[in-house]
Image (spheres, rainbow, N blue to C red):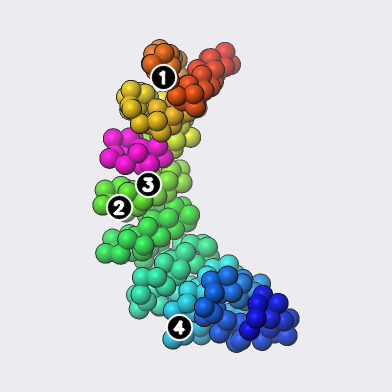
């Protein structure tokens, strides 16, 4: 097998089993291409992909899960769930991603449990998947994930909670503005701005006094989106203190946005 052209020839003649084996190729781009070509076959590829979930090569199993997610056929859900508890974490992450792509909310209870996995990749993937599914049964588990030891899980939990459409979630999200990770604080500020949450202003204002650029930047942007005149004086004080051009522009944009919203 020399390259992509060989894989395309396999797909053209309907040689799906050879494409399955190609998902175990030593080159990542070949594995990805084989998975994409199998997904492009649609439901015709379901039987071989479901069978490939038990292949001896973990790369083949990853590619099969990925392709099933791209196809999006709910008939694959029970087979993916059956493999989730039996897999190593690398393959398990692909299975969780596939379940999120398919979008069947019957998987929510399973993914909620997986947010408590000992494995970081599975926790992260499950938190992300629950945000994509948007089922409110996940809210308590996502709030719990805000206390995860890994900042990438906490960050993703903030984003997933923002997808739930529940206004009262501004409270736990606001508390993340005091997180030890600048990345988590930045995402929390952005989310609160997107929620146009007036009650979060008192939590955002202290970030304007931070020495961390992203704190001030995202707080200013969020305050501009919220549009309350309560933020005008703190923003003006922050502008006088600032020497970073990008932050100054963000503060000025926020002040302009607040001025425009107050005139409407």
Question: Is residue 148 something one can see in this rendering?
Answer: yes
Contact flag, marks 3 and 1 (Cβ < 8 Å): no
Q: Earlier in the sequence, mark 1 or mark 4?
A: 4
Q: Earlier in the sequence, mark 2 or mark 4?
A: 4
Q: Residue at x 33, y 27 (%)?
A: 211
Q: Which residue is mark 4?
A: 57
For the residues bearing labels 1 and 2, Cβ distance under 8 angstroms = no
Q: Is residue 182 magenta?
A: yes
Magenta-drawn segment: 172-187
Q: Which residue is mark 1?
A: 242
Which structural element holds mark 4?
loop
Q: Quadrant of the C terminus?
A: top right
**Looking at the picture, does residue 251 appear above or below residue 188?**
above
Q: Residue at x 38, y 41 (%)?
A: 183
Q: Main SS of the magenta segment?
A: helix
Residue annotated with mark 3: 155
Magenta span contains residue 15: no
As drawn, the label of residue 150 is 2
Q: CA distance from mark 3 to mark 1?
A: 27 Å
Mark 3: which secondary structure? helix
Marks 1 and 2, how far apart at CA? 31 Å
Q: Nearer the viewer, mark 3 or mark 4?
A: 4
Residue contact between numbered discs 1 and 4, judged by CB atoms under 8 Å = no
Coordinates of residue 208 in the picture (x, y in percent): 37, 23
- Against 71, residue 255 (above or below) is above
Mark before the other along the chain sequence, 3 or 1:
3
Indicate which disc, 1 or 2, sits on the residue closer to the N terminus.
2
Q: Are marks 2 and 4 in contact (CB under 8 Å)?
A: no
Helix, strand, or loop for circle 1? loop
Measured Cα–Cα span from mark 2 to mark 4: 30 Å
């Amino acid at each position: 097998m020399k390259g992509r052209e060989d894989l395309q020839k396999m797909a053209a003649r309907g040689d799906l089993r050879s494409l399955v084996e190609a998902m175990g190729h030593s080159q990542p781009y070949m594995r990805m291409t084989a998975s994409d070509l199998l997904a492009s076959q649609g439901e015709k590829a379901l039987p071989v992909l479901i069978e490939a979930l038990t292949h001896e090569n973990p790369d083949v199993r990853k590619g099969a899960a990925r392709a099933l997610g791209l196809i999006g056929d709910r008939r694959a859900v029970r087979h993916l769930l059956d493999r989730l508890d039996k897999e190593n974490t690398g393959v398990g992450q692909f299975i969780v991603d596939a379940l999120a792509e398919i979008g069947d909310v019957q998987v929510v209870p399973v993914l909620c449990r997986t947010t408590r996995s000992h494995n970081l990749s599975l926790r992260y993937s499950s938190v992300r998947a629950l945000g994509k599914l948007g089922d409110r049964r996940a809210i308590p588990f996502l709030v719990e994930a805000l206390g995860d030891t890994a900042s990438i899980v906490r960050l993703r939990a903030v984003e997933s909670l923002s997808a739930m459409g529940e206004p009262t979630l501004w409270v736990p999200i606001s508390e993340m503005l005091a997180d030890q990770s600048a990345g988590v604080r930045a995402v929390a500020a952005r989310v609160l701005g997107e929620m146009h949450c007036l009650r979060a202003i008192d939590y955002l204002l202290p970030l304007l006094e931070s020495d961390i650029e992203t704190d001030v930047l995202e707080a200013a942007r969020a305050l501009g989106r919220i549009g309350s005149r309560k933020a005008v004086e703190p923003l003006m004080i922050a502008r006088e203190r600032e020497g970073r051009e990008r932050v100054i522009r963000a503060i000025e944009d926020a002040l302009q946005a607040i001025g425009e919203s107050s005139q409407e």
